[in-house]
Amino acid sequence: MNFYKNLLFAAAAISINVAIGQEKDPVLLTIGEDKVLLSEFKSVYEKNNSNTQVAKSSPEEYLDLYVKFRLKVKQAMDLQMDTLPTFVQELEGYRKQLAQPYLTDEKTKERLKKETYERLQQEVRASHILIRVDETASAADTLKAYKKAQEARKKVLAGEDFAAVAKEYSEDPSVRNNNGDLGFFTAMFMVYPFEKAAYGTEVGEISDIIRTSYGYHIIKVTDKRKARGDIQVAHILVRFNDGAKEESVKDIAVSDSKKKIDEIYAKLKAGESFEELASLYSEDNKTAKSGGVLPPFGTGKMIQPFEDNAFELEEDGDFSEPFETQFGYHIIKRIKAFPIPSYDEMESKIEKNLSRDAKKLYTTEAVVNRLKKEYFFKEMKNNLKPFYSLGEEFEDKKWNGEGIKKSNQVMATFADQQITNQDFIDFLVKRTPDLRKQDRKILINKQYNHFINETMLDYEDSQLERKYPEFKALVQEYHDGILLFELTEDQVWNKAIIDTNGFKQFYEDNIMDYQWPERVDAVIYVANDLKIANNTYKLVRKRINKDWTPEDIKKMINETSQLNLEVLEGKYASQDNPYIDKVNWVPSLSKPIAIDGKYAVIEILGVIEPGAKSIEEIRGKITSDYQDYLEKEWIQSLRETYPVEVNQDVLNSIK
């Protein structure tokens, strides 16, 4: 039914209040006690008539559709269907989606997407030193971490080797293996502040101290290159013998692995199939059976030696010499290279994959800053001090504001709203109690910012219908569309299926509309040429005595080619099939008949007299007709319940 719902949404006329003075906006029609202004109908008529690819309807034609729509929605409202939990939940879901563009800074969002696409054209290689500090750490711990980062940066700027300083200071566990070298990466691979700093630092330069959710970073950019895009390869892996414990045994195992990969490489050079060799010899159990094929990957997704060897292959089908990684020996075959797609092709993927830090720039932060200016936001931060002084009672899971005088002190004002300390208490009560064990002042400040942001966005969300008529109209369209769908489903679609007695009675009352004309039961053998048709004719003449079916004959004729013969079986009325009308309708077998370059042998099995079509034969057709009948009956009933009167003079004024 989703198709019908979408269709109804698209066709649903909506009631839009247009700012036209009442004296210039006469009543076009009344439906029961409801008055419909000219502007309401005109807006909807013009909107739905704007599609140049669809034949335009006259005001009179469209009014008929509009009245039917308004009648159905009025009944749904009178039945209070808009109060049902399922309706409320569905409409809230649609409204939330529709509200997103209004709660987003589109300019910042577009700038970030294009910035990201530009960065995707380049890959950066960088090393870093990480000094860990939690976002909610105490001021003392934060300062301690920052000073440690300053100390490390000074040493690097003074000329000390970055790798040595990284080993001494960095709290990134991987520093033991990589000396702080992160290899090449591209946009959307790192958290946004780190990415921004890396792309903004020149090769050989040291960044400022950067704060991320992980702590403080010092970044050294060591290289930049044009992005390589993605690539898909297949590989053959021969693993080292990890079970060997003694060094001498290990050496022998490694030597055996090298000999094995070299033998495989020799077979490849001799022209043997890469896929077959991978299936036979690769020790990557996940890919061997599929010829060693791996999913496409880009920079930073595989270990560096594997990536480098893959991207060095110049043509599809090229394969590498054996090379070593920590997993063993590999040979790679290039399947396909994928250049970076256009911006239009990548836009939705970029928007989806932007990091949380980047998204905050065009959602929460940008929008809240705009709203604060628009609504003259003013805060009294001194009233936060009592929260800083909260004792251990704050860490209790049952805390409900103890330690704060519940005097409804005003903490901030905007528009015509006041935010009190009780509002903030209510907000904190809902937070995870475990968070309350962090540094008190930092935690309170952070939660206060979340609270203000949430309050501002919730208020703006509540004002969208007032501020943006087009949003109000769109929500109303979904509102009416859902009601229309639900009521039509109940009154027409489901009723036509569930009401078996009514369905059967409708069929019997209208049985003369469901009649078969005279028909024949026939088998039509269609051949590509006359020789095949003649052979078919001979076999069909024998089929009764031989107990052959039409399918048996088809198999015999098509033994050399499936294109030789096509067999059609069924009951046909005149003009149902071009071959049937070429023969007399009596039980018989025709000789080959030429039509449109093909030859048909027609076997008439019997003649069927005119008669009623059974329900099972045309259930779909009857169901459709019964639904149309129920719709007409329903509309007639609605017109009796809610009389419709049209002001013809006002209707005639629409051009």
Image (cartoon, rainbow, N blue to C red):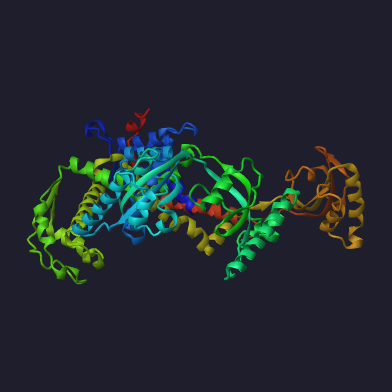
The answer to whether residue 520 shows anywhere in this view is: yes
Asked whether 178 or 192 is in front, the reply is 178
State the image coordinates of residue 96 (x, y, percent, origin top left): 33, 51
Q: Which residue is found at the position 39% from the left and 60% from the top?
A: 173
| Res 14 quadrant in image | top left
Residue 633, horizontal then vertical, whole percent: 45, 52
Residue 73 visible from this viewpoint: no
Q: Nearer the viewer, residue 565 or 233?
A: 233
Q: Where does residue 184 sit, x and y in percent of width and height? A: 46, 46
Please name whichever residue, 265 or 42, is drawn nearer the observer in this view of the structure: 265
Q: Quadrant of residue 647?
A: top left
Q: Is residue 406 left or right of residue 595?
A: left
Quarter of the C terminus within the rendering: top left
Q: Position of residue 477 (x, y in %)?
A: 36, 45
The residue shown at (22%, 64%) is 438
**In-front residue for pair 415/577:** 415
Q: Which residue is pictured at 72% across the width and 53% down the height?
A: 610
Please, is residue 642 above or below residue 244 in the view?
above
Tally the marks: 0
